[in-house]
Image (cartoon, grey):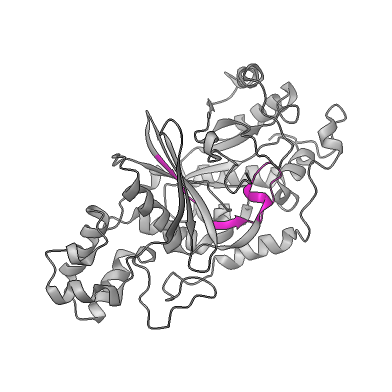
Amino acid sequence: MFETPSTPDPTNPFESMPLVPEPAGLDLDALADAATASEADAGDTDPAGYPGGTQTPAAAPSFFGLLPSEVEARLAEAGWERYRTQQVLEWVYGKRTRDSAAMTNLGKAQREHLGEYVDLSLPRIHRMIKSPKGDAVKYALELPDRARLESVAMLSRRGVTLCISTQAGCGMACGFCATGTLGLTRNLRAHEIVAQVVHMLETTGWDDPGYNIVLMGMGEPLANYAHTMKAIRVLNADQGMRVGARRITLSTCGLVPQIHRLAKEGLQLGLAISLHATTDALRDRLVPINRRFPLRELVRAAEFYANTTSRRVTLEYILLAGVNDRKGDAERLAEIANGLPCKINLIPYNPVPQLPWERPSNEAIQRFADWLFPRCPAVTLRWSQGGEIAAACGQLGAKG
């Protein structure tokens, strides 16, 4: 097992000074406790679906927060035959049609009254921005309580990837992330997570039935455990959106108890660990939750996940010029990786206007990769898309 120094490295000035001011009121214990409490949160069946909502208790729940079995149960209460539920599911998820009037194999009365039992509307698109190359689209959605979130659709030669958010804002305060500067507005409910995918499938015009979903947008997915898992099960359902679990990747900054719980869910989800540093001294400053769950605990949790699910984890490592891109960092990263069933995803830093970091030169990036390979199981470089529209990794919610 690797040994990670807990004292600052005197050769790196960034390890002996505060990298960014710690957010006022940052309470790591409260963050960890809130994440645990979220596991017991009820499903997505409350009518309003958001704090301070104006809907009445009789309002229909969002269709997109319900599993197919829950849709069936709700329509059965209204006297609908079971096969009618299958027809509705096929219209919405198979044919991407949310207008009940267009569901021609339903009876007239059913078409007219479907909206009384399930709500097929989506949050309002506040803004949609396409990159100059047309290979990335950033969505800003406004929720009924005026909370806003961003998500990104990306197109490459490998296919379509949809990057979605699980919280409005984020409470984890990672020092290099634009979203981390916002603080947490609130958790998203399951239907608000699924709605992002539905919006992107409806509006991009991109046709890729094997699209991938990454929970790498705004927020820490495991800090909103119950609704994140409910959304994943809706996306994964055979009679729903049919997104295979192996096409869904969840990224976490390191909530160790929730990683253990996720490993036992019985899903073949990809797990990405936002590592970004190889010593506790540096990671404490870049990823504050490390002070609660240090590297040794995090690596053990990653190993447990890999062994339980038989899936390699991904170690995400953002390269910050002069901070974590030295040879010693690469050597320690290789040591960590060689003790895990994993792959390493190197992410050159995407600049954020209000933050002080710099992206390494292309030569420094390649040199770091060369130090790792072939000492590590697998190393890839992620050249993030959407930087021109502040849609790249770490840029969601950026000012300017």
- The C terminus appears in which quarter of the rendering? top right
Question: Does 63 sit above or below residue 300?
Answer: below
Query: In the drawing, does residue 196 fall left or right of residue 94?
Result: right
Using the rendered view, name the quadrant where residue 286 is placed. Answer: top right
Q: Residue at x 65, y 18 (%)?
A: 371
Question: Does 24 sit above or below residue 400?
Answer: below
Question: Does 384 sit above or below residue 77?
Answer: above
Magenta stretch: residue 179 in it? yes
- The N terminus appears in which quarter of the rendering? top right
Magenta stretch: residue 286 in it? no
Question: Does 257 sit above or below residue 47?
Answer: above
Instruction: Indicate the position of residue 349 as horizontal and vertical percent values.
Output: 63, 32
Numbered range of the magenta stretch: 161-182
Query: In the drawing, does residue 171 fall left or right of residue 374?
Result: right
Q: In this orientation, which residue lies closer to the viewer: 130 or 324?
A: 130
Instruction: Indicate the position of residue 89 as horizontal and vertical percent values.
Output: 24, 61
Query: In the drawing, does residue 29 fall left or right of residue 34?
Result: right
Let me know if residue 31 appears in the view: yes
Q: Residue at x 76, y 54 (%)?
A: 23
Q: Residue at x 34, y 66 (%)?
A: 63
Using the rendered view, name the quadrant where residue 326 is placed. Answer: top right
Instruction: Indicate the position of residue 123 as horizontal and vertical percent values.
Output: 42, 61
